[in-house]
Amino acid sequence: MGKPIWWFAPGMVSLALFAWLLTLVPSEAAGRIFAAYGGIYIVASLLWLWLAENRTPDRWDIGGATVCLAGTAIILFGPRS
């Protein structure tokens, strides 16, 4: 894409920060949080597509991300017994 190599830095830092933050979650909830992260990752990827790659997400991208965020909300906020 003709971008300088330092464009990798924000992604690498974000991934390292996420991995570190995941270690702070109590172990009985870490898997649930990691599963919910998937929806956030998808939205962040589409933001990258839009802001860094200058490609506007289409209605299918936005619809899919909305479904994923709904799944994330169900995982995080669903009632537990």
Image (cartoon, helix red, strand yellow):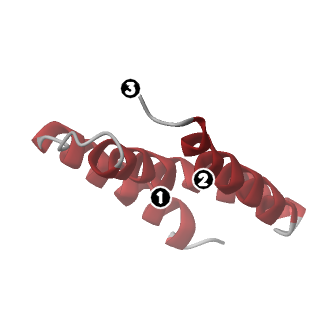
The x and y percentages for residue 61 are 23, 40
Judge from the rendering whether residue 34 lies leftward or rightward of residue 78; answer left or right. right
Q: Secondary structure at mark 3?
A: loop
The x and y percentages for residue 11 are 60, 47
Task: Please tell me whether residue 67 is drawn above or below residue 81 in the rendered image.
Answer: above
Judge from the rendering whether residue 17 lies leftward or rightward of residue 8; answer left or right. right
Query: Which residue lies at the image location 87% right of the left edge and 61% below the top edge?
Result: 23
Q: Secondary structure at mark 1?
A: helix
Query: Which residue lies at the image location 55% right of the left edge and 67% below the top edge?
Result: 76
Mark 3: give few (<14), some (14-19) or many (20+) Cα within 10 Å: few
Three-letter amino acid code at the position of disc 3: Met
Find residue 72 and name its label.
1
Mark 2: give few (<14), some (14-19) or many (20+) Cα within 10 Å: few
Q: CA distance from mark 1 to mark 3?
A: 32 Å
Three-letter amino acid code at the position of disc 1: Thr
Work out whether residue 15 or residue 6 is closer to the camera in this orientation and state it. 6
From the viewer's perspective, is the residue at label 1 or at label 3 nearer?
Answer: 3
Does the CB distance between marks 1 and 2 fall below 8 Å?
A: no
Q: Secondary structure at mark 2?
A: helix
Mark 1: give few (<14), some (14-19) or many (20+) Cα within 10 Å: many
The residue indicated by pointer 3 is: 1
Q: Please identify the quadrant where the C terminus is shown.
A: bottom right
The residue indicated by pointer 2 is: 10
Closer to the N terminus: mark 1 or mark 3? 3
Q: Name the image quarter holding residue 45.
A: top left
